[in-house]
Amino acid sequence: MPSLGGWEWVILALIALLLFGGSRLAGIGRNTGRAIREFKEETSSLRSTGNPAEPTSPTQAAPTVQPSPTVQPSPPTAPGGTGVDPERS
């Protein structure tokens, strides 16, 4: 696979600028930088605590355990498996 040279990167940047526009590209770059910064902060805090199972962010809530629904047993079926009571027919 050939590597991209300088002119190829310039052409790709111009195509992206034409497709998205300058303001949208700036917003994409800003959001990407913010996401990378948050990711680095979280990974460094996890490494410093040494306990990856413990949430470090106050926005992460502990999962709540909800009871499972009770299942009612079905009434017995008539012989033959038709589900019709022969006495009622």
Image: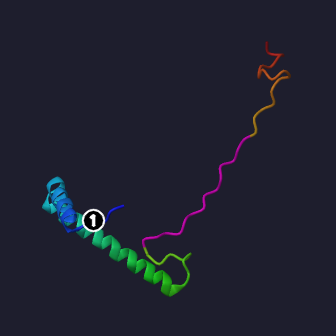
Q: Dot 1: few (<14), some (14–19), or many (≥20) neighbours within 10 Å? A: few
Point out the stretch of residues depicted in magenta: 59-72
**In the rendered image, which residue does mark 1 sit on?**
4
User: Quick check: is 58 in the magenta stretch?
Assistant: no
Q: Quadrant of residue 26?
A: bottom left
- Counting from the top left corner in percent of width and height, residue 53 is at 56, 75
SS under mark 1 = loop
Q: Amino acid at mark 1?
A: Leu
* The quarter of the displayed image where residue 18 is located: bottom left
**Residue 89 image-quadrant placement:** top right
Q: Is residue 30 left or right of residue 21?
A: right
**Residue 29 at x, y = what percent?**
24, 68
The residue positioned farthest toward the right in the image shown:
79
Q: Residue at coordinates 17% horizontally, 60% vertically from top-left? A: 11
Residue at 83% x, 16% y is 86
Give the x, y percent position of residue 24: 18, 60
Is 33 or 63 nearer to us in this picture?
Answer: 33
**Viewer-side residue, 40 vs 51:** 40
Q: Is residue 81 above or below residue 69?
A: above
Residue farthest to the front? Answer: 2
Image quadrant containing the N terminus: bottom left
